[in-house]
Amino acid sequence: MISLRKAREGLLSPLFSSSIRRSLSSNSNEDARDSEVFIHPSAVLGKGVSVGPYCTVGSSVKVGNGCKLFPSSHIFGTTELGESCVLMTGAVVGDELPGYTVIVGNNIIGQC
């Protein structure tokens, strides 16, 4: 599996950096740089998707309606999450290897 740092560097190339950086701050006193979310512009997010701080969503990712990505969740490669999936804190799904990852709805990925 590729390293998270290497994957983020690929996502944050100069061509895309301005369009994929979104700063989410849950606390007005929190420094916005400490809660960055990286969503590639070609990623598809369904309705009602919740993305926590420090998350990464890659270019070939489809996230279904109502999915929740808890802090530090990362989705890479050609990956599709069905409706109402939950990625717990620190979960990593997908890879740069050939193939397709599909996780159908109502699943919890990671440690509860």
Image: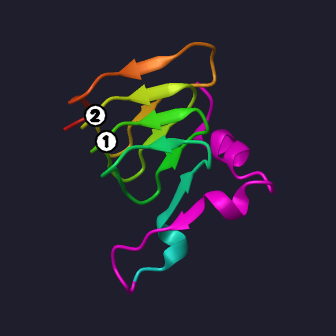
Q: Which residues are magenta?
A: 1-29
Residue 109 vs residue 54: left or right?
left
Identify residue for label 1. 65
- Magenta stretch: includes residue 53: no
Q: Amino acid at mark 2?
A: Glu
Badge 2 element: loop
Badge 1 element: loop
Task: Say whether residue 94 is visible.
Answer: no
Circle on res. 83 = 2
Labelled pair 2, 1 in contact (Cβ < 8 Å):
yes
Q: CA distance from mark 2 to mark 1?
A: 5 Å
Picture residue at 71% right of the left edge, 59% below the top = 17
Between 27 and 67, the residue placed more toward the observer is 67
Residue 101 in the image: state x and y as whole percent: 46, 19
Farthest residue toward the bottom?
Answer: 29
Q: Quadrant of the N terminus?
A: top right
Picture residue at 39% right of the left edge, 86% below the top = 29
Residue 53 in the image: state x and y as whole percent: 42, 60
